[in-house]
Image (cartoon, rainbow, N blue to C red):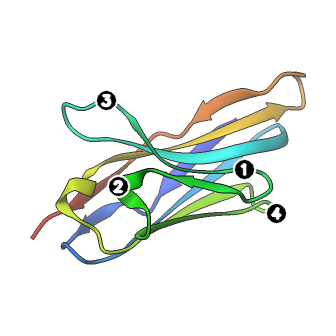
Amino acid sequence: VQLQASGGGLVQPGESLRLSCAASGNIYSISDMGWFRQAPGKPRELVAVITSGSSTTYAESVKGRFTISRDNTKNTVYLQMTSLEPEDTAVYYCNAYLRTRTKISYSYYWGQGTNVTVSS
C-alpha cells in the first residue's frame, strides 16, 4: 500500500493551496483518512480527519479556513487550504486507516509528506 501526497508549495499569506493524497495497492477498504502536519521543532499534529461516511473533524487552528474531502472512487483525500498563514508552514502528511485484501485487521498508513511554506 502506498499513499502519495502532492500539492505543496510556497505561497504568500492569504493565498490558497490544495493538497491531494491517493492511496494505492492491495486495498480492500478504507475507513478514516486524514491530514497531519509537523512544523520545525514541533510534534506532529492533527489537521483534519474525514470518515468513510464523510463526517469531518478539524483542528481549532484551521476551522473555517481548511476543508477536507475525499473521493472514494479514487481512494483519494484532499485538503483545500485557504487564507493561509505563516503559522501553517509545515510538512503535511496524509494518513489512512485501511484494510488490505491480505489482512483482516485495519492499520494506519502514512504518506511521504509534502512541504507547505507560507511566507511573504
Mark closer to the chain start, 4 or 3: 3
Q: Position of residue 33 (x, y in %)?
A: 65, 47
Disc 4 target residue? 73
Image position of 30 (left or right of 103):
left
How crowded is the residue under tag 2: few (<14 C-alpha within 10 Å), some, or many (20+)? few
Residue 51 badge: 1
Residue identifier under label 2: 61
CA separation, marks 1 and 4?
15 Å
The residue tagged 3 is 43
In the foreground, 56 or 36? 56
Q: Are marks 2 and 3 in contact (CB under 8 Å)?
A: no
- Cα–Cα gap, marks 1 and 3: 24 Å
Q: In screen coordinates, is 37 left or right of 52?
A: left
Question: Which element type, helix, strand or loop, lies under badge 1?
Answer: loop
Q: Amino acid at mark 2?
A: Ser
Say which label, 2 or 3, has the lower sequence index.
3
The nearer-to-camera label among 2 and 3 is: 2
Frontmost of labels 1 and 4 is 1
Residue 108 percent across, percent down from the top left: 65, 29
Q: Eyeballing the image, is 50 above or below 14?
A: above
The amino acid type found where label 3 is placed reads Pro
